[in-house]
Amino acid sequence: MATLPDISHLKINHFKVFEALIAHGSIQAAAEVLHQTQASVKRSIKELETTLGVTLVIHGKGGVVLTDIGQMFETRMNLVLNEIQRSVDEIKQIKNYQDGTVVFGCSHLKTLKVLPDVVERVQKKYPKVRISIHEGQQSELMPSLQIGKLDFFIGILSNGISFEEYVEEPLLTCQYCVIARKDHPLAHATSLVELRNAKWYLPLAVPGYYNFLEAIIFPEGQGSECSILRGNSIAVGERLLLEADYLSIVPLPMFNLNFVKNQFCIIPIKESLPDGHYSLIYRKQGFLTPLAKLLIDEIRIECGKKVIYRDNKTDK
């Protein structure tokens, strides 16, 4: 039976050095970021590899590259480091509630007006709290949630998520619509069939809500002139819609934003698109810090107040 390596002499610094080396790509860059000498960085990596009995990185002219074992080790190591940082942050928050950090992910940040309201309220009450928001689709942000870099995520979930690992709480529902620039040739179309030859900019997402939508917006299949470009950049999407006559699908509440109202229009199709159901999700095995719990509670309260707008009427 193989004997497990003795790692008792390793320190957090060994893992921090490895993390910096991978993040910045070279011994020199890692040393500069960590304010250490290159010799010290090399020594830490050598000690780590010797202790584990494996090669974690390969050094080349272009920098360092992870070995297969290195890639596996990095994933586990990040999880451990993030949990340690979370524990330290939690202790600080318990000692001083106003001192701490919360990091969460969100899709369609500009649509979810509840979030700016909540963040402003929490920061006003606790001025020293540091809140970071990462905007992106679930497919982009789930790895960060999985390894503990994010406290929680808010967005539309795909069917592939495992709820054995995560807690899901429904938050709010909103209607979706097809948009185009004002004066677009198809701005007055009344049916999806009329849009089958259009150019579309759709989110880059794993199988789930947007793939389901794609099956709906082409009831008779894509036209011969149809093209679909995928991406998650709001800035790129805006330019494509304004300058290249692309169409897109967005949450209806986005039209509460003045810059959207001034430049875009909703195409009045007769078909209804399925509603988007936004949920809060966090790891079952992860411990939410006091500040993360506070922020989540405020989000729950705010979502309970909100009214979803549909066809210029309010649903109570």
Image (spheres, rainbow, N blue to C red):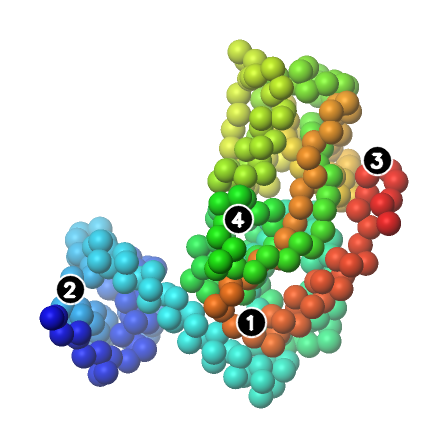
First reached walking from the N terminus: tag 1 or tag 3:
1
User: What crowding class fits label 1: few (fewer than 14 Cα within 10 Å), some (14-19), or many (20 or more)?
Assistant: some
First reached walking from the N terminus: tag 3 or tag 2:
2
Which amino acid, mark 4? Gln
Name which quarter of the figure residue 266 lies in: top right
Q: Which residue lies under the disc numbered 1?
A: 288
Instruction: Classify mark 1: helix, strand or loop.
Output: loop
Which amino acid, mark 2? Val
Instruction: Classify mark 2: helix, strand or loop.
Output: loop
Locate residue 125, reporting x and y percent: 73, 76
Q: Which residue lies under the disc numbered 4?
A: 138
Q: CA distance from mark 1 to mark 2?
A: 34 Å
Which amino acid, mark 3? Asp
Q: CA distance from mark 3 to mark 2?
A: 62 Å
Count of number-bearing discs: 4
Answer yes or no: do the residues labelled 1 and 2 have beta carbons within 8 Å? no
Q: Which residue lies under the disc numbered 2?
A: 54
Instruction: Classify mark 3: helix, strand or loop.
Output: loop
Locate residue 225, reporting x and y percent: 54, 13
| Residue at image location 52% in from the left, 59% down from the top | 166
Residue at the extreme left: 1
| Residue at image location 58% in from the left, 81% down from the top | 93
Residue at the extreme top: 224
Q: Which residue lies under the disc numbered 3?
A: 311
